[in-house]
Image (cartoon, grey):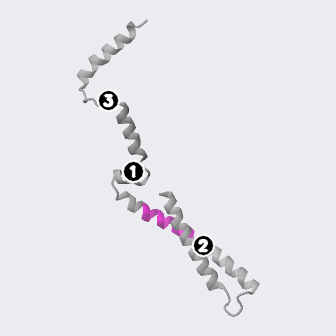
């Protein structure tokens, strides 16, 4: 998600730099050094402002779109790491039925006794 936010901000900054640069050049003498320096500075200022604004706007828009996606689809967009982790955990642990607390207590006590009997 951060990749796309940065990419949108960078595209806005690049576009605004070129627009401000070309609009700031003198059409009668495009190779005038003084106007060229001013045009570059205007382009840099516009690029910085649009980068900051683009970062904020892209952050709001992209997070707004992603929050509407269900968790399963979001996991697939992020590379499926959680799905693979859950799959590995399911493969390692045997499927068991959930037990009530009263059933689990004697089982835990018998396991503890068995551990204490070993030399």
The residue positioned 35% from the left and 54% from the top of the image is 73
Q: Quadrant of residue 60 in the image? A: bottom left
Earlier sequence position, callout 2 versus callout 3: 2
Q: Quadrant of residue 112 in the image? A: top left
Q: Which residues are magenta?
A: 48-62
Q: Is residue 100 above or below residue 12?
A: above
Q: Indicate the position of residue 114 as horizontal and vertical percent values.
A: 35, 11
Q: Nearer the viewer, mark 2 or mark 3?
A: 3
Labels 1 and 3 touching (C-beta < 8 A) = no
The residue identified by callout 2 is 47
Q: Residues within 10 Å of mark 1 (few under 14, many from 20)?
A: some
Regarding mark 1 in the picture, which secondary structure is present there?
A: helix
Q: Residues within 10 Å of mark 3 (few under 14, many from 20)?
A: few
Q: Quadrant of residue 77 in the image? A: bottom left
For this rendering, which residue is in front, 45 or 75?
75
Using the numbered discs, state the Cα–Cα distance from disc 1 to disc 2 in whole angstroms: 34 Å
Q: Indicate the position of residue 72 as horizontal and vertical percent values.
A: 34, 50
Labels 2 and 3 touching (C-beta < 8 A) = no
Q: Residue furthest front?
A: 91
Q: Is residue 37 left or right of residue 23?
A: right
The residue identified by callout 3 is 94
Q: Nearer the viewer, mark 1 or mark 2?
A: 1
The residue identified by callout 1 is 75
Indicate yes or no whether the magenta region holds residue 32.
no
Labels 1 and 2 touching (C-beta < 8 A) = no
Earlier sequence position, callout 1 versus callout 3: 1
- Which quadrant is home to the C terminus? top left
Q: Is residue 105 above or below residue 117?
A: below
């Amino acid at each position: 998600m951060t990749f796309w936010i940065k990419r949108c901000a960078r595209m806005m900054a690049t576009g605004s730099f070129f627009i401000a640069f070309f609009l700031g050049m003198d059409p009668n003498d495009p190779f005038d050094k003084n106007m060229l320096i001013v045009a570059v500075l205007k382009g840099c200022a516009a690029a910085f402002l649009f980068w900051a604004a683009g970062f904020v706007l892209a952050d709001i828009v992209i997070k707004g779109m992603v929050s509407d996606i269900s968790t399963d689809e979001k996991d697939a967009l992020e590379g499926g790491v959680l799905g693979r982790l859950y799959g590995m955990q399911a493969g390692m642990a045997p499927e068991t039925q959930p037990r009530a607390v009263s059933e689990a207590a004697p089982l835990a006590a018998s396991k503890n006794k068995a551990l204490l009997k070993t030399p």
